[in-house]
Amino acid sequence: MPASVSFEPLTLVDLIRYGASRFNAAGLSFGHSYDNALDEATQLVLHALHLPHDLSPVYGQGRVTTEEKDAVLALFQRRVDERIPAAYLTGEAWFAGLSFKSDARALVPRSPIAELIEAGFEPWLGGREVRRALDLCTGSGCIAIATGHYHPDWDVIGADINDAALSLAAENKERLLAGNVELRKSDLFQGLQGEVFDLIVTNPPYVTDDETDALPREYSFEPELGLRAGFDGLDLALKILRDAPQHLSEDGLLICEVGEAERALGELLPQLPLAWVEFKVGQMGIFVVERHDLVEHHDAIKRLADARA
């Protein structure tokens, strides 16, 4: 060991504990990949020390150098002072077991749809064949690219209206060698005329205007275009429900995330048979619906969606 390297009696666990305490005392908001101070402090410590995100706990008692401690504390200070989401500080977010580049061009990847992707979209697909899949409102490309990764025999399109988001998605496509994923610019389905898919997955904006205005400072670093969705959070979801049948194969399936707008959607369309997905932590505002059910209730959906013009 070089004589110039000095050690203080600080371990990785000490730094993580200290960071979590600082974050809680500062009243930070957590909701970008991690939902608590301890996990976020762990993420920042491992990043600052150039260690893998899945480092074994046996290394927790490893001591850090003074230089390493200073690097960690500087990152903690930025998180407290600037309120920047941790994923934007590190430039990385993990989604469906994959490492994505993350920056302010798109929302931080965090959808529970990751769990569906890793489960092969079962039992919802019911073994039906999928040749083409669409990720509408792809943002960073995380859903499209993860879907393509776990299903290399599928052709996957990721579509988004935002050029900046698409540029980030393109970098993630290259990062993860997603050769079966194609990126398109499209305002919902407008740039996909004539395209038909066996599976459409979408995580559109679904935060109400009031909720968007009241979000903690951390969310101000994300593009508002990816969050705001009208007075009840359903401006885009209703249009997707209206237009999806034109782009689904006969036995096609739509999977859509609406978050807290779940209740509002149920009140608007109580007759539409939506299956709400149960995740390991319970329901999280994601529904599955068959094409034939969307066709059957198209008139009611269209009236509601058209009113949002």
Image (cartoon, helix red, strand yellow):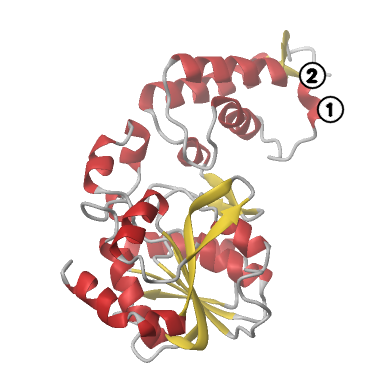
Q: SS of the residue at dot 1?
A: helix
- Looking at the image, which residue sits at the far front? 271
- Looking at the image, which residue sits at the far top? 9
Give the number of the disc on residue 61.
2
Residue 88 in view (yes/no): yes
Which of these two is toward me, 222 or 206?
206
Answer above or below: position of 35 versus 156.
Answer: above
> Within 10 angstroms of label 2, few (less than 14), some, or many (20 or more) residues?
few
Q: Residue 40's x, y, as percent? A: 56, 31
Quadrant in which the C terminus appears: bottom left
What residue is drawn where x is 39% and y is 65%? 137
Give the number of the disc on residue 97.
none
Identified by mark 2, the residue type is: Gln
Which of these two is toward me, 134 or 288?
288
What residue is drawn where x is 44% and y is 71%? 273
Q: Residue 149's x, y, as percent? A: 65, 68
Q: Quadrant of residue 12?
A: top right
Q: Would residue 231 be found to the left or right of residue 187 on screen?
A: left
Tell me if label 2 and label 1 are in contact, CB under 8 Å: yes
Q: SS of the residue at dot 2?
A: helix
What residue is drawn where x is 62% and y is 27%? 45
What residue is drawn where x is 55% and y is 15%? 21
Residue 188 in view (yes/no): no
Q: Residue 210's x, y, as percent? A: 22, 42
Residue named by callout 1: 58
Which of these two is toward me, 76 or 272?
272
Answer above or below: position of 82 versus 51.
Answer: above
Q: Residue 254's x, y, as percent? A: 47, 74
